[in-house]
Image: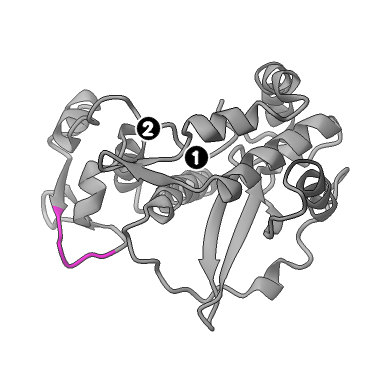
Amino acid sequence: MEPVIQLSLPLFDPPAFDDLLQQRHACGILTVIINRRLKHGWQVKVLPFSGKRQLSIPPFLNEAPEEIKNCLIGWALLPCRPQRSRKKTVREQRSLFEKKIWNYIESLPDVPRRMSRFNPDDFSGNARGHSFDLREVFDSVNNSYFGGSLKALVRWGNAGSRTSYHATKTDANGHRFNLITIAGAYNHRDVPRFAIEAIMHHEMLHIAVPPYKKNGRAVIHGKEFKSGERKFNWFREWRKWEHGKLPGIVRKTGKA
């Protein structure tokens, strides 16, 4: 299980959409077209009579990593009118797909940022959890590992969510902010201090070591990032806990 949303890019060219659709036996259900008028987002259209779907993407998403392409396909194939018993599950799946895709888009240096109605004041009271105050955790990690140099807003993700991520947001005045969202699965009394600090340290590294382009590809988890991650004192313990204990906590929340 991956508790973070950032991606390690593949060594080889990602497979084409047609190849992925064939693997998922979805060639007769979904087609993907490039729409050069789209600058940031993507959209799906259900064709009349046949019920087939058409996913329109901006050109740069045609070069996205395999995981992002699969997220786009998964998003496009979600039921438009799910049964009442599945509405919540479908909504959570759609939100997860969208977070991963937008996080990838916002990591690309050459893609213009989308303007939003982001208001930093909305995040002032969303840091306190059952056992940890994310503001205090951020400040502690910031002072211990980054010399207090980083600035970010912090918040908890939805209850039981399993992905943490860093994103940049723009307010109505054009000011940029770093926003760190910690997975709701970490907001549990059984989560040890070193684990919450480790996931915070990981997301803060994405501010300290921003993505860059190499040979035409965005590098998110490069050598410098991985080296910085291993400087966290409890890195190995966190990875062991993450694989051994976190799945059980997720199951306790009923969101697995």
For this view, does 192 lie left or right of residue 237? right
Residue 23 in percent (x, y) is at 22, 24
**Magenta stretch contains residue 102:** no
Q: Is residue 115 above or below residue 110?
A: below
Quadrant in the rendering for residue 119: bottom right
For this view, does 252 lie left or right of residue 30? right
For this view, does 201 lie left or right of residue 55? right
The structure residue drawn at horizontal position 56% and vertical position 25%, both measured from the top left corner, is 1
Q: Is residue 118 above or below residue 142?
A: below
Quadrant in the rendering for residue 66: top left
Helix, strand or loop at label 2? It is: loop
Cα distance in 3D space between marks 1 and 2: 10 Å
Which residue type carries mark 2?
Leu
For this view, does 134 lie left or right of residue 206? right
Q: Is residue 250 above or below residue 80?
A: above
Q: Does residue 256 appear in this view?
A: no
Region in magenta: 34-39
The structure residue drawn at horizontal position 61% and vertical position 43%, both measured from the top left corner, is 205
**Which one is in front, 13 or 67?**
13
**Residue to which mark 1 is pinned:** 6
Q: Does residue 114 appear in this view?
A: yes
**Which one is in front, 178 or 15?**
178
**Mark 1 burial class by Cα count in 10 Å: few <14, some 14-19, many 20+:** many
**Residue to which mark 2 is pinned:** 9
Residue 253 in percent (x, y) is at 72, 35
How many numbered marks have been drawn onto this rendered protein structure? Answer: 2
In the image, farthest residue toward the bottom: 173
